[in-house]
Amino acid sequence: MSIIKTNKKLILRLAFLIVPFGILTLVLHDGQSGGQTGGGAYDLSGLIYGLVLFACITVWMIWMLIACFLSKTPIDRKMYLKLLLIGIIALVAAYFVTPRMF
């Protein structure tokens, strides 16, 4: 029963990481940009989108780190450490993808 509950927590928390990458996808696949990456119908520059992406991932990683310290069971602690690792990978991926927005 505990593992099922942990899997539900994992999926829920992982869903919060999908939102910033959804924003990034909107920017990179803007249909009205005339072939250029970013721009188009969006008024914000790539710098703002990049900062929002990094801020979302950083807040998410801090949330996972605090949750890891507050978790009571080893299974939950292990799950939060995995989610923190996924956040680090997402931050590195965002670092390499964001320059395409400028």
Image (spheres, helix red, strand yellow):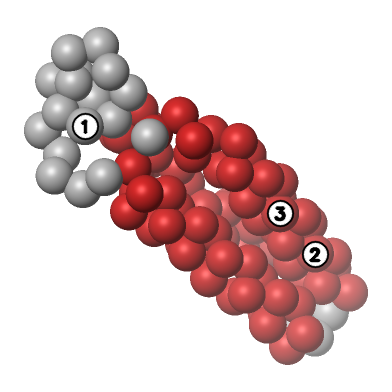
Q: Residue at x 26, y 45 (%)?
A: 45
Image quarter in which the N terminus is found: bottom right
Nearer-the-camera pick, 77 or 64:
64
Residue 2: horizontal and vertical position, in percent? 76, 67
Give the number of the disc on residue 39: 1
Q: Which residue is mark 3?
A: 88
Q: 10 Å neighbourhood of mark 2: few (<14), some, or many (≥20)?
A: some
Name the residue furthest top. 35
Residue 55: horizontal and vertical position, in percent? 47, 64
Nearer-the-camera pick, 44 or 13:
44
Question: Eyeballing the image, is 86 above or below 71?
Answer: above
Q: 10 Å neighbourhood of mark 3: few (<14), some, or many (≥20)?
A: some
Query: In which quadrant of the rendered view does residue 78 lie?
Result: bottom right
Gap in angstroms between the C-alphas marked 3 and 1:
28 Å
Gap in angstroms between the C-alphas marked 2 and 3:
11 Å
Residue 61: horizontal and vertical position, in percent? 63, 67
